[in-house]
Image: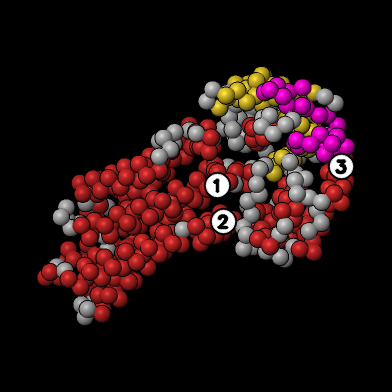
Amino acid sequence: MKLKVNKLSKKFKEEVILNNCSCSFEEGKIYGLVGRNGSGKSVFLKIICGFYTPTSGEITMDDYNYIAHNEFPKDTRALIEKNNFLSDLSGYDNLKLLSSIQNKISDEEIIETLKQVGLSEYKDKKFNTYSLGMKQKLGIAQVLMENPKLMILDEPFNGIDEKSVERLRELLLKKKKEGHLIIISSHIKEDIEYLADVIYKFDNGKIIQSK
Amino acid sequence: MRYLITNDLQYIKRNKVKLLLYCLVALFIGIFFKLSTGYLKSNYTFYSALGLKFESTDIIALLIFLIQQIVLVILAIDIIEKDISNNMANIFLRMNMTKWIISKIAIIIILSLILKAIIYIFAINIDLLMNNSYYINNWRYVIIWYAKDNLITLFNCLCSLILYIITLSHKNKMLFIIVIGMTLFLYNTRFDFFKMKFTFIMLTIIMLDILIIMLLRVKRKEILEVKLI
């Protein structure tokens, strides 16, 4: 899988968020997006997901411009901004319900994913009893469980304790070795320096490759 | 579909129960008043108690009609808007927008069927309490009214959704609701839907569905970026 971003710009009213940005992403690698809050990382990720339309420029996935065809990227999962899970259901039931949309994975695979992110002990607890870190882990599990080719994680380690972050880092490295393309954004550079093969820095609407 | 239904029902349970209860209480009072005080107990009384017909001077019948329509329009727009505002990653990366909007329309139909069933059951019981049995004696007609009433409500909801999508850049919800209310009032006083044939209403609804699906493609940017407008 190859994702190419070519001369991408995004304006909201008169404010320029992204200005003529170009970069590319390949499978089997982890890409880190860094930059201060409000630098345009989340907008960039939402454009890749097809939620926002670029003002100009194009994005292609394997040479197919899905945005021009009014589509969302295929085989992609994302954790962007806040998690939206059903508070009255358990973590496991939430994932099962989400997986029922495409019906691609078994219950065992859901349980395995929960184990991988460190939530197996709490899988039957209601979502509204989860701590911030647990909610974030469930969000990561939602991205990983269906083994998508492209995984997008916006500030995935927010609220997660250091030990769990280490565990999740190892998990993401494993996914990279399996050939997945992973894009992670963080405003803390150290968070992803360890993980990323390539780092793109967002500054004043521009993207600069810094690793 | 199962995901969207569960999600919407939980949203309604958490955020719209009060609105639904207030509206049901208002409707029950209106129906009770109509059925207990309707002069002569003409057919009009029984129609108007369900909000199926109203004369321009009959404020209560008009309110019974408007409350039912507007509540469902609000619910329809809310369950669509909440997905766009908070749940895009979970939904749109797993299903396309056409499948999503068709599921949403199905949920609107389910909500309408439930709400109207409650209203009809209440009206039938009040009618029995008043020793009239008009609805029971005409149960075949009542079933047809119920079906047409739901179709007309769906028609109104779809028209409102189209208006909502077209006017997305004008984010004044109250103004929008007033415009919808007035539009519903005006065209429902001009047309007698109950004289229309099922097939005609069904065809119109299918056309509106297609129009919404097309609008979703044309106005995709405005719809998905509604939070930023």
Query: Which of the 4 image quarters holds residue B88?
Result: top right
Mark 3 lies on a secondary structure that is helix
Q: Residue furthest left?
A: B40
| Mark 2 crowd level (few <14, some 14–19, many ≥20, 10 Å Cα) | some
Q: Is residue A20 above or below residue A158?
A: above
Pointer 3: what residue? A173
Pointer 2: what residue? B7
Instruction: Tell me how far mark 2 sits from mark 1, CA to CA.
Output: 9 Å
Mark 1 lies on a secondary structure that is helix
Instruction: Tell me how far mark 1 sits from mark 3, CA to CA.
Output: 32 Å
Q: Residue B144: where, in percent of width, then height? A: 30, 63
Where, quadrant-wise, is the C terminus of chain A in this rendering? top right
Horizontal side, residue B84 vs residue A127: left or right: left
Pointer 1: what residue? B83
Amino acid on which disc 1 is placed: Asp
Mark 2 lies on a secondary structure that is helix
Task: Indicate the chain on which mark 3 is placed.
Answer: A
Q: Residue A135: where, in percent of width, then height? A: 71, 54
Where, quadrant-wise, is the N terminus of chain A in this rendering? top right
**Which is more toward the observer, B86 or A111?**
B86
Amino acid on which disc 2 is placed: Asn
Q: Is residue A202 visible?
A: yes
Circle 3/circle 2 CB separation < 8 Å: no
Circle 2/circle 1 CB separation < 8 Å: yes
Q: Which residues are magenta?
A: A185-208
Horizontal side, residue A182 vs residue B34: left or right: right
Query: Which of the 4 image quarters holds residue A195?
Result: top right
Instruction: Tell me how far mark 3 sits from mark 2, CA to CA.
Output: 33 Å
Q: Is residue A69 above or below residue B154?
A: above
